[in-house]
Image: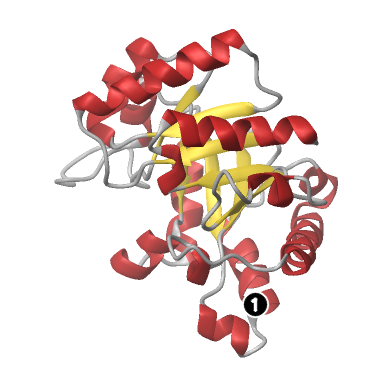
Amino acid sequence: MRPLVAGNWKMNGLASSLAELVALKAALAAKAPACDVLVCPPFTLLAQAAVVKDGFALGGQDCSAKEGGAFTGDISASMLKDAGASHVIVGHSERRQYHGERDGDVAAKAGAAWRAGLGAIICIGETEAQRYAGDANNICASQVDGSVPGAATAANTTIAYEPVWAIGTGRTPTTADIIAMHGHIRNCLVRRLGEAGRGIRILYGGSVKPDNAADILNLPEVNGALVGGASLKASDFLSIITALKQV
């Protein structure tokens, strides 16, 4: 299973930020990574980023479950594909929290992504209160069952485990916690999908930085990372990408 390191720029980035992608392109050309590399800039930069990309893929940060129509402000999976994307993030905790997205909404978006020829990165993860209440395993199992369509395969789906309380806070779970949760998610995928669940990549996300990437990415059942703020600078993102060479 080839690892994946994906960068989620969130609501950051102007045209000047494309210089970071040019730097990333040059570095990857000079030394091939031991993983697949994906960058998910804001929608406004996708088409421009597609012109400079080489050695990495592009993704959207969200998509509508609808294929088109009178849905002002939304963007369809086919529009992302047309702009140069090969993947799309769905079900990120910020979408769940601030936009009220539920598991069924996430599953519908994943299906829309597949129909457009995009790979879906489906995000799951518990809040701090849920973890301290001892419900983390149940929450993640429920999200796998509700957010991952039954037709998911290694070719069309990646799971990103992001403990909500670790996103952007500088805090991360212990290595033992990460190992346990990724193993649990793997079991949930196999239970839901059968043998297909064994081949789906499970990324870790939540304050992944250059100084902790090697420790996290070397753990069992961690098949890469979904990186937030540290993906905005090519130098930081490259430090995380090269940490996978130790695997």
Q: Is residue 186 above or below residue 21?
A: below
Report the side of 90 relative to 100 (left or right): right
Q: Residue at x 70, y 40 (%)?
A: 153
Percent coordinates x, y for residue 145 in the rendering: 64, 64
Q: Residue at x 21, y 25 (%)?
A: 16
Q: Residue at x 47, y 62 (%)?
A: 167
Pick the quarter of the image with the C terminus. Answer: top right
Residue 4 visible within the image: yes
Q: Is residue 245 above or below residue 139?
A: above
Percent coordinates x, y for residue 193 in the rendering: 76, 52
Q: Secondary structure at mark 1?
A: helix
Per the image, the residue denoted by label 1 is 136
Percent coordinates x, y for residue 5 in the rendering: 59, 36
Q: Residue at x 22, y 31 (%)?
A: 44
Viewer-proximal residue, 98 or 178?
178
The amino acid pointed to by label 1 is Ala
Q: Is residue 245 above or below residue 188?
A: above
Percent coordinates x, y for residue 81 in the rendering: 39, 25
